[in-house]
Structures are given as C-alpha cells and as structure tokens.
Image: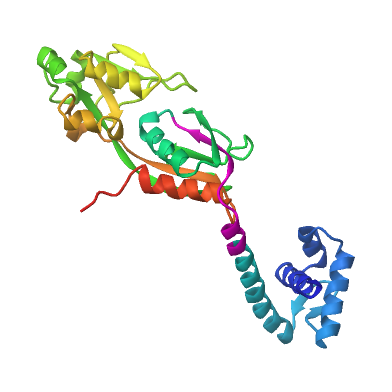
Amino acid sequence: MESLNGFAVFVQVAETRSFVAAGRLLGVSASAVGKSVARLEERLGVRLFHRSTRSMTLTAEGAMLLERSRRILAEIEAAEQELSQASGAPRGRLRISLPQVSALVLPVLGEFMQAYPDIELDLDFTDQMVDVIEEGFDAVVRTGEPSDSRLTARRLGRFRSLLVASPDYLARYGTPQVPADLLQHRCLHYRFGHSGKLEVWALRQEPGAPALHLPTAMVCNNIETRVCFALQGLGIAYLPDFSIREFLADGRLHSVLENDVQRTGVFHVLWPASRHPSPKVRVLVDFLCERVFPEPSN
C-alpha cells in the first residue's frame, strides 16, 4: 500500500507540477510530498522530474511512468467501486425536492418504495428553487435546462402545455378560434408561490400585437385545483399535458387553440456531482428515468 501511495503522490505532482499544490490536494505538507517522490525515484533508480527554482517538468521516464500509473490507479479505483456497490444494497434516508406536480411523480415514487423498502423517502414539494447542496438534498426534480455546475443531471422527459375545457363549458361559452377570443372566456390561472406572479399563457400572436390581458375567473398555486375546476365546467385552464391525458382520452376535457399554444418544457432529475453516486441515489435516478415518462411501446 505504501508503494501504491507513492505512485498516487507522483501522479498528483505530475498533474500539478508543484509539490505545494500536490500537498494541498492530498492534505499533506510539501516536504512530505517531496520525500515521497524522492523515495520513489530511489526505489526505481531513475529521475522522474527535471526540477529548477521556477519549473518542474517530467523526464522521459517520468512521462512513461505517469501513463502507466494513471491506468493502474484507475483500475484499482474501479475495482473498489464495483466491490462497494456489490456489497452495499440501497438503503437509508433519501431527501428529494419535487415540483408541485404530484400526479406526475407520486405513482412512480409509490412503486419505488415497494421496490426498495430499505430506503426512507423524505419528500419536499415546492416550485421554488432550492440549493441542492446547501440544503442537504440527495436529488431534485425540476423543469428547465440545468445551470448549476455542481450538479449532475439526467433528462426525464418532455411535456407541452395545452388549453383545455369541458364539453359542457364549451357548449355554454363557445369554442375560442383565435387567442383573442379568450378575452371573452373564464380563465383559470396559476400563481407562482415565490413571486406572486401569474403564469403567462404562451400563445401565438402576430408580430407587434399587444399582449393579451386575460380575464381571471380563478387563481391558485397548484395543478389539481385547475384540473378539478376545468372538469366541472368552470373555465379554460392552461395545463401540462401529463396532468390531463386520461381526461382528454375519455372526452371529459377538450383541447382548444392547440396550434396557438407554444410552450414546451423538459423535466430533469439532478443530484450533487460525484464520480460514484451512492447506491440509493443511483437506483432512484434509474427508476425515475425509466418510469416517469416511459417510452411508448411499439
């Protein structure tokens, strides 16, 4: 093991070209790093570095040793990881931040609990941005493109927004033919909790046309209420397609202005970046990616 440690120190020095920088990364003094390299050179009988007061470069023998040392250390690391994963069944507390779209994730998380009974789920539902690392989350599910370089992300799937109403509502108020017709309708809106602003309905408009100030029949901060009120014939709602698929399929809701609704989005699952995520995070990510937006069967 002492010999392997010497090679690890050598690789760190070769990559940083500095005893001080290598020591800082390894948590030891520059003097200890220098002595380790000297012992390795003595044992191998070759000079590994050309050293001067201003620079440090690899000798030909050092360059050859660096290439082989990297391969050896990578193989050892991979073997340790495989053994660790084989012996470590997923277990423990798993803290997850989720958007307030329970219809999308709750059935899948219920299946996950059955598949992994040794994992304890701690679920936090919010549409506000959270600091995954600072707030101690193991993983988060969010819309939009990832922007935090400290996190690893995998795409769960895409969705699109639709304008929907019940057949009864459309029979009473008529079916809008162009976006401006919505000015004569009852609109069911969503309010963002963190800003208090209403969600903008992304509708196709002619260039230069003024923004539509849509009527407000009801405002809430979740999906379920808008779905419920739309089913009761109380207005037109702007909703993600995954929340209303069954109601569109059985005719309880109809889509309107489908060619004029322009918003699409994407869900990602994100977790703190690591070369070797814990088994519980790994199985969660795989489970969500396979089931939240399953690929349609042929």
Which range of residues does the magenta coloring cover? 82-99
Give the camera-side residue of 55 and 156: 156
- The location of residue 112, given as percent across then percent down, is 44, 41
Give the camera-side residue of 74 and 213: 74
From the viewer's perspective, tell me whether residue 192 is left or right of residue 16: left
Question: Is 85 drawn above or below residue 177 in the view shown?
Answer: below
Residue 232: name its quadrant.
top left
Residue 93 counted in the magenta span: yes
Q: Residue furthest bottom?
A: 45
Q: Which residue is painted at 46% across and 28% down in the image? A: 127
Colour convention of the picture: rainbow
Q: Which residue is painted at 43% across and 43% down in the image? A: 268
Q: Quadrant of the N terminus?
A: bottom right
Residue 210 counted in the magenta span: no
From the viewer's perspective, tell me whether residue 21 is left or right of residue 251: right
Question: Is 293 drawn above or below residue 62 in the view shown?
Answer: above
- The location of residue 129, given as percent across then percent down, is 52, 32
Residue 146 visible: no
- The location of residue 144, given as percent across then percent down, is 42, 40
- The location of residue 41, given as percent across then percent down, is 83, 82
